[in-house]
Image: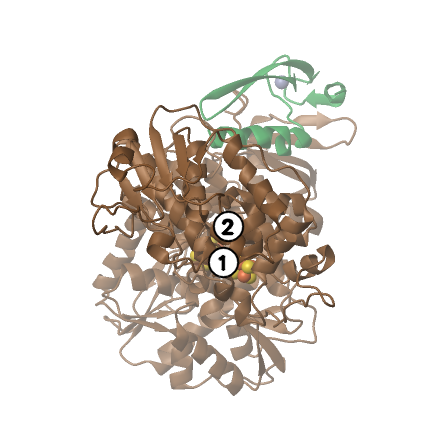
Chain colours: A brown, B green
Amino acid sequence: MDHKLIMSFEEKCIQEQPPACNATCPVHVDVRGMVAAIAAERFTEAFNIYCKSVPFPGIIGRICDHPCQSACKRGEAGDAIAIAALEKAVVQQVEVARPKLTPASPKSQRVAVVGGGLSGLTAAHDLAKKGYQVTLLETGSQLAGRIRERFSTELPEQVINDDLAVIEQLGITVQLNTGVGKDISFTSLCEDYDAVYLTALPGQQPGELTIDPLTLATEIKGVFAGGSLRLGNTSPIGSVADGRKAAISIDRYLQGVSLTAAREQEGPFQTRLFTSLVGVEPLPVVPMGQDRSFYSKEEAKREAARCLQCQCLECVKVCPYLEHFKGYPKKYVRQINHNLKMIKGRHEANILINSCSLCGLCQEACPEGLHLGELCGMARQEMVKKGKMPPSAHDFPLRDMAFSNGPSCTLTRHQPGHTVSNYLFFPGCQLSATAPEHVVRVYDYLTEKLPGGVGLMLRCCGAPAEWSGRRELFMAELQQIKDQWEEMGKPCLVLACSTCQQIFQQYLPEAKLVSLWELYDLHGLPQVAAAKRPTLVAVHDACTARHRGEVQEKVRKILLALGCRLEELPTSGNKTECCGYGGLMQYANRPLADEVAKRRIKQSPADYVAYCAICQENFTAKGKRTYHLLDLIYGEADPTTPAKRRVGYSQRRENRVKLKNKLLKEVWREKIVPQENDYTAIKLLISPSVQELMEERLILVEDIQKVIAYAERTGKKLFNHDSGHYLAYHRPVSVTYWVEYLPEGDGYRIFNTYSHRMEIPGGDE
Amino acid sequence: MSQEKVLECLKCGVKLAMGNVEVTYLNNKFPIQLPKCPKCGLVFIPEELATGKMLEVEKALEDK
Ligand code: SF4
Ligand code: SF4
Ligand code: SF4
Ligand SMILES: [Zn+2]
């Protein structure tokens, strides 16, 4: 896949952007991590996190002017986190040895740092750590002189000396009472050293210095300037940041690499991280105990617990699939990319790519509009193209589609007595499968209400091919539909399924589309005698109807007209959730799809109404009483009888065949010769528990019939003397089916069935 | 697995006995010991094997 395209997905996800506190801190202390450690009473860890960014923790921890705090997100719900006070608590309360500093392998280059304030000290510290030979020149008689004066109450002598011990430890040469321009000339400084950092102006000025704010370089080669010379001395943390910036520049300068490349995020910057405050209770800052200007450990812990631990994860909060893989889109995009590029080795992201329901909810939730489903869809296409798609993932739904679009199910006709069609009813393969009687009624209704001929087309729109990444197969299916539609005079398509509608909208944009629900609204609902309907229902919008506001609205209007009270699920409309079928999730990752469906049906105790046959079937399979909108329209939603059972895979196939034959016979008065295969006549006796097993294992009645037909014809079967049952296997497709059975009456009783994809050599012709 | 003792190939009228079978998937061959008809080669793959270990191996191969 195109690298730029992948990158555009990866860049959209802002989850890895730093929180506001971190981004605003001039030296980017990992405030979130530090505060989390405090909240968990891990003060030593908090201290170590702090030390990673701050060179003199004892000093800075007590006097930092904390610009981070005004940026803190918590400030929008109560008070901002008292970050400075927490840092102070950490440096005061932790008695651990400073992390031992070992300079990198010594370098020969020499750097002079002029001025022993925070900025100079930081630059000297950072450069010495990198292995440079650093000399620190200070006019006064001690280091950090001004800080000592200015913060005499906050900073005990001991704290300063402890912090500055690191200067000696790093082998920095300190020359006190040394004024540049007085004791040593600026020119000789420039000659003796490979680079110079000025934080105070030399006594004998080298003329006006202009300082580049990005790099702190001056017009004199190898001379950098910053700190109070540039900033005044208002912000201690600003001085530290300047020293750090100078050190980075000097290191780059001495290594001969670009001074300017990729430095945008060095100082404070605006983070792109989005953190929702929805549901966040406003909380005031934790006060300090009586007469104290610092937190006790206990207080610090409570204050730290107020931190929101800012992160985005808006999409992960709403999508169980994204949650399931324990990451977030930015990570997933990288994993998907790796999976596509890798030639040898385990393609561990296959399951990630194939589990997404492609439903687009993430895009609705994401502040940046990232649609991971789009990427998963493209990744599937690429896997198919390269022959890297796991065969089992979509095998079953593709065979089901082939069946729906095979000769026993497809039908395309003008309305009897018409040679053209103004409209074409396309019920979709799933409604035809779960509720063929509704298809008959709807066709009846449409031919009565709509003028100019209403044709009928029975088949699948091709969504399984599209979802599974079989682009060519899908295009071939689409072409057939297109050809027939053109032949019929390009009628307006009447759609009962939002997936068909989504597919045609995208791939047959030249066709006029109308949803069945809009037509019911327009032409009036059929009058039904003795209609049974529930009083309260919760509407489940299909994920493929997410962007069909007008359809969602019509569905609700119809329900109200039918006398139902409506309940809205917590997420509906454009935020609706997938039932677990979308993107063929159900076949690629059954446990996850089960979880998704269960989560959805728990959202309300009310009976659900779906206007997608599969949503209904999926929820019904999990024991949730769910009606199809047509059940309500035709008065067959009886809340007082036990919930409908799911129709099941085998029955769904049979229903499609029967529907075609029924319509041919009753509407077009055509004689049909059912083309019976030898096996279809085999009668099976299957208990409900074995039926359940068949649903779970995706084994069809016809698969079992084929095994028995084969075994009985060839005699190839086993006899189990323990159970007294026959056992036979056969591989009619890319799956080997096993059936445990016995003849009974004029049929066969089925005791068990299972399957595998491995081939057994020779055993099967 | 004593299962082979009670399993009989109805075509040949003999009890199954453990034997070498080479099952294949995605161009990979796996030698495996399975109850097998000594005459015609009909085999028995138990349910636990098909839905357990065998399924695992299938998945692993598909991801290779
Ligand atoms: S709430 Fe916590 S993570 Fe968020 S900005 Fe404030 S301190 Fe940082
Ligand atoms: S498309 Fe749907 S299932 Fe896939 S990641 Fe987005 S929200 Fe989750
Ligand atoms: S919503 Fe999800 S995809 Fe979007 S930025 Fe946040 S974590 Fe990333
Ligand atoms: Zn045999």
Q: Residues within 10 Å of mark 2 (few under 14, many from 20)?
A: many
Dot 2 beta carbon under 8 Å from ligand 1: no
Dot 1 beta carbon under 8 Å from ligand 1: yes
Going from the N terminus, do you reach mark 1 or mark 2 first? Answer: 1
Residue beneath the point at 51% across and 74% down: A630
Q: Position of residue A82 (x, y in %)?
A: 59, 63
Q: CA distance from mark 1 to mark 2?
A: 8 Å
Judging depth in this view, the residue of A234 and A308 nearest the camera is: A234
Q: Amino acid at mark 2?
A: Val
Q: Position of residue A571 (x, y in %)?
A: 53, 69
Tell me where residue A381 sits by quadrant.
Answer: top left
Does the rendering let one see residue A574? yes
Residue beneath the point at 38% across and 58% down: A232
**Pointer 2 chain:** A
Q: Residue furthest right?
A: A722
Marks 1/2 in contact by CB < 8 Å: the verdict is: yes
* Label annotation for residue A21: 1
Q: Residues within 10 Å of mark 1 (few under 14, many from 20)?
A: many
Mark count: 2
Q: Which residue is mark 2?
A: A29
Q: Is residue A677 above or below residue A511?
A: above
Q: Is residue A434 shown left or right of residue A364?
A: right
Does the rendering let one see residue A434? no
Q: Is residue A19 shown left or right of residue A518?
A: right
Secondary structure of the residue carrying tag 1 is helix
Judging depth in this view, the residue of A618 and A719 nearest the camera is: A618
Residue beneath the point at 53% across and 62% down: A615
**Pointer 1 chain:** A
Tell me where residue A728 sits by quadrant.
Answer: top right
Q: Residue furthest front?
A: A182
